[in-house]
């Protein structure tokens, strides 16, 4: 078997890597009772009708994440799996407000994830960045307070993002928070155009000044926006298996990825919440390859895009090294 193509993962919620077996192990350790008989019963509950039905289960299961060690273990488990799938660089989201709601301070989360990221290169051969997301169904004041609480940890946080329930929570709600993030020198991304309209993608660019759009799928409803995204080389972090599981599209064969590439968009393939959506980044690559009949050259473009879209500006030599690995890679049948 060929080794997987080297790639960066740019849209990955660390909380979304919580596998049922680890959830039960952490629950036992922390004395948390879960409303499922066992890991198999929990996995059976992963049938979602939309984003909200997923979020309800997802935030509930986070109850097992309590200590810094829990977050370290979670992150180690992700990095180990990612390394086996050819991930060389990972930009990882976390949701501090979801943990603060249970009394877990931001510092515990950052220290816990950070302990794993610190040794990631040495252990897993993966360079990393950390991106702090605001929950868009919480208030702008809560997001501002979260940014304030993060100030002692900014040496470990590369950027900010925006996630959770999209429809009814437009990007403009967070204008002030993103202005403050920019003043603090943080990179800016946001989920937009997953379930929400193309107008939210425009707003994320124009009002929040985002440098990368998470999902962005619905831009395809607006040809002028597609032209702009292509012209300005704004990266879109797509998550094909997530889109199927959250019923944004019916099947992988309906995914617009290929049309997006043909429109000149800088798209990348990622896993979003792999423990919940049926696979990690490798399964997402294999899924679109098979469902859309992508060629080796198109897969190489996706891998190249992932490094181009990454926040490696402070380490261009590394980016060049990764890109050279992509060019040297031989796909099966090539
Ligand atoms: N796909 C997704 N959309 C919005 N918020 C999320 N949080 C975790 N996964 C998410
Ligand atoms: Zn996401």
Image (tube, rainbow, N blue to C red):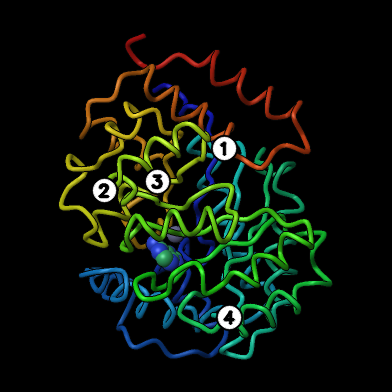
Q: Residue shown at 44%/76% (left/top)?
A: 24
Measured along the vertical axis of the image, is residue 97 above or below residue 268? below
Q: Return the x and y of residue 204 as percentages of the image width and height.
A: 50, 58
Give how far apart the Cα atoms at labels 3 and 2 are. Answer: 16 Å
Q: How many marks?
A: 4
For the N terminus, the quadrant is top left
Q: Return the x and y of residue 275 as percentages of the image width and height.
A: 39, 60
Q: Residue shown at 22%/68% (left/top)?
A: 47
Q: Earlier in the sequence, mark 4 or mark 1?
A: 4
Q: Is mark 1 within 8 Å of ligand 2?
A: no
Q: Secondary structure at mark 1?
A: loop
Q: Return the x and y of residue 322 as percentages of the image width and height.
A: 63, 26
For label 1, count other residues whose C-alpha is less than 10 Å away and answer few (under 14), some (14-19) or many (20+): many
Q: Residue shown at 70%/48% (left/top)?
A: 120
Q: Residue shown at 58%/53% (left/top)?
A: 210
Give how far apart the Cα atoms at labels 4 and 1 are. Answer: 28 Å
The residue beneath circle 2 is 221
Q: Secondary structure at mark 4?
A: helix
The residue beneath circle 1 is 309
Q: Return the x and y of residue 331 as percentages of the image width and height.
A: 40, 17
The residue beneath circle 3 is 238
For label 3, count other residues whose C-alpha is less than 10 Å away and answer few (under 14), some (14-19) or many (20+): many
For label 4, count other residues whose C-alpha is less than 10 Å away and answer few (under 14), some (14-19) or many (20+): some
Determine whether label 3 and label 2 are within 8 Å by CB: no
Determine whether label 4 and label 1 are within 8 Å by CB: no
The answer, for residue 188, to whether it is visible in the render is yes
Q: Which numbered circle lies on residue 140? A: 4
Determine whether label 3 and label 4 are within 8 Å by CB: no
């Amino acid at each position: 078997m060929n080794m997987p193509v080297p790639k960066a993962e740019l849209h990955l919620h660390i909380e979304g890597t919580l596998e049922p077996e680890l959830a039960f192990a952490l629950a036992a350790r922390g004395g948390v009772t879960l409303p499922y008989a066992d890991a198999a019963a929990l996995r059976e509950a992963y049938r979602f009708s939309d984003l909200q039905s997923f979020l309800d289960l997802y935030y509930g299961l986070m109850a097992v994440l309590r200590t810094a060690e829990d977050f370290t273990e979670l992150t180690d488990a992700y990095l180990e799996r990612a390394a086996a799938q050819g991930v060389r660089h990972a930009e990882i989201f976390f949701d501090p407000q979801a943990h603060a709601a249970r009394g877990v301070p931001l510092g515990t989360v950052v220290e816990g994830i950070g302990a794993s990221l610190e040794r990631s290169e040495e252990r897993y051969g993966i360079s990393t960045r950390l991106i702090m997301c605001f929950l868009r169904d919480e208030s702008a004041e809560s997001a501002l307070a979260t940014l304030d609480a993060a100030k002692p940890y900014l040496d470990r946080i590369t950027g900010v993002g925006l996630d959770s329930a999209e429809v009814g929570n437009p990007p403009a709600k967070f204008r002030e928070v993103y202005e403050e993030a920019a003043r603090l020198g943080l990179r800016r991304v946001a989920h937009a155009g997953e379930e929400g309209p193309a107008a939210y993608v425009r707003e994320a660019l124009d009002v929040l000044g985002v440098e990368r759009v998470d999902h962005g799928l619905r831009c395809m409803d607006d040809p002028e926006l597609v032209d702009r995204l292509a012209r300005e080389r704004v990266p879109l972090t797509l998550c094909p298996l997530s889109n199927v599981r959250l019923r944004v599209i019916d099947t992988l064969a309906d995914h617009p990825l290929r049309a997006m590439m043909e429109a000149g968009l800088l798209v990348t393939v990622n896993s979003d919440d792999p423990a919940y959506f049926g696979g990690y980044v490798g399964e997402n690559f294999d899924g679109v390859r098979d469902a859309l009949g992508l060629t080796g050259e198109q897969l190489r473009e996706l891998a190249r895009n992932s490094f181009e879209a990454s926040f490696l500006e402070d380490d261009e030599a590394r980016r060049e090294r990764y890109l050279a690995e992509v060019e040297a890679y031989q796909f099966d049948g090539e």
